[in-house]
Image (cartoon, rainbow, N blue to C red):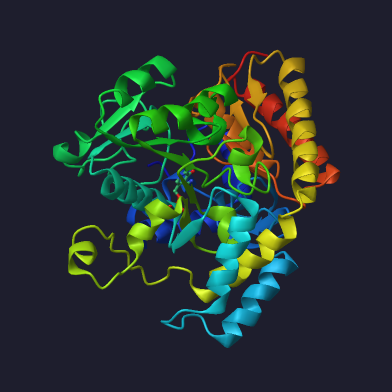
Amino acid sequence: MATQATGGRINQDFVDANPESQVLHARARDALAGGVTHDVRIHEPFPVMIERASGSRKWDVDGNEYVDYTMGHGALVLGHTHPIPTNAAIEQLQRGTHYGASHELEIEWAEQVRSMMPSVERIRFTGSGTEATLMAIRLARAHTGRDRIVKFQYHFHGWHDYSHIAQSDPLDVPMSPGIPQAVQDTVTAIPTDLDRVREELAKGDVAALLIEPTGAAWGAMPVEASFVQALPALCREHGTVFVLDEVVTGFRLAPGGAQQLYDIKPDLTTMAKILAGGLPGGGVGGRADILERLEMRGDPAWDRGQRMAHPGTFNANPVSAAAGVAVLQHIADGAVHAQMDAVAARLRKEIQDVFDRHDLGALMYGESSYFHVSMTGTPMRNGLAGAAGAGLRRALHTHGVHIMTGGGLLSAVHTDEDIGRTVEAFEASVQDLEADGLVAS
Ligand code: PMP
């Protein structure tokens, strides 16, 4: 990984604006594996180091201010340091961070989720979204007595062995080494084509079908709602557990997530991010007859044969529960969603106008409170993957806007002023791309 920018105005401006981040990154490379703690934070020539955040903004160690569209990878629906989760978490921190025991807040948290997502008859909390999808797969296998999982090509369900399969090109190579062939053989990844779904489910050996409801990579490769709506009945017909992965969409697309918008009832829903109010946490919710497989019955035949075991030190830890309850209660009436969606729609339109004015052929798209950018003009998994896309993201940094690898997410506290700044930053960044010859001018 280069740490020194090599020519070009965009690189030079980035390096000039971030001397302290560059120094810290040199330290990070020595101490942190790969220099970062999450793959999406890899950024050439080095990532900026953030010092504090508030509302829709964050500031780095060089004093640069950003309008933030990473929003805690989608977890911060009320923005940074919002008083509702912050005060709930502080109060809970003072009462105890871990009781090593059951507590009322976890019940309240479960009840709150249930009131917002009627498909959730029971829930079990986990430490993360990855643990949630892993757990849903284990539950489905235990429930059906089948091994095979069907997922969709490019869909992301976390980083455990099963979800790293067919996540990005080349689809026949897992995202990572270290995934046994025997594990790979239990996962079939198919395109979003109903005939292919029917064909696989008809074989009668599929434990679970998993999908990201708005399409791969939180909608970067959109699917039709009608496609998702056809899946529950097909799964029911073939005795397959239908798992809706609402880790991103849950509580974001609507108070009840994508399943509310699409009017569908999954067998199991996986969730995380907004669920825990911006703190770590996840969960699997759904049909009581499946989740009751976690119940200890005192009958050895059940407990050691039928029952799914599930420990986890930080499951439903009181601090995450407190923040989660506070945020979910606050957003339950949908007012926040209407506001975020309206601001995001304006953002998408105005940035598309910038692209069009410059005849860039790029596409700004998305739904609800998120957006994706594709420099090719076609929806794709990471539309900023090429040199022009990387240049755009780097230039946006310099002009005070931080987006994720292929797009970004808004919160309830992003304002018209943020949008104005963002549109100006896109305008300036496109001009930089033209000046550097990364796009035609
Ligand atoms: N499923 C989906 C759809 C996700 O987007 C993610 C993370 N972005 C996960 C699962 C994994 O969640 P976590 O990062 O909390 O492990």
- Of 7 and 106, nearer the camera is 106
Quadrant where the image shows the C terminus: top right
Residue 304 horizontal/vertical position (percent)? 19, 64
The image shows residue 102, relative to residue 67, as above or below, that is: below
Vertical relation: 292 (above or below) 287: below
- Residue closest to the eye, 40 or 268: 268
- Please state which of residues 367 and 10 is positioned toward the viewer in this rendering: 367
* 52 in relation to 390, above or below: below
Q: Quadrant of residue 356?
A: top right
Q: Is residue 61 left or right of residue 291?
A: right
| Left or right position of 97 against 398 | left
Residue 437 image-quadrant placement: top right
Q: Is residue 202 above or below residue 57?
A: above
Q: If the image is split into quadrants, where does the N terminus sit?
A: top left
Residue at position x 51%, y 80% in the image: 97
Q: In the displayed structure, does residue 20 sit left or right of residue 363?
A: left
Residue 30 position within the rendered picture, expressed as x and y whole percent measured from the top left:
34, 60
- Which residue is at a point 52% across and 23% down the rendered structure image? 227
Residue at (47%, 32%) from the top-left corner?
Answer: 232
Q: Residue furthest bottom?
A: 95
Q: Is residue 240 left or right of residue 186?
A: right
Total labels: the figure holds 0
Residue 403 place in picture, x, y as percent: 61, 41
Q: Position of residue 100 (x, y in %)?
A: 41, 82
Frontmost residue, 128 versus 225: 225
Q: Does the rendering let one see residue 36? A: no
At a point 52% along the width and 28% down the height, the residue shown is: 228
Q: Does the image show residue 259? A: yes
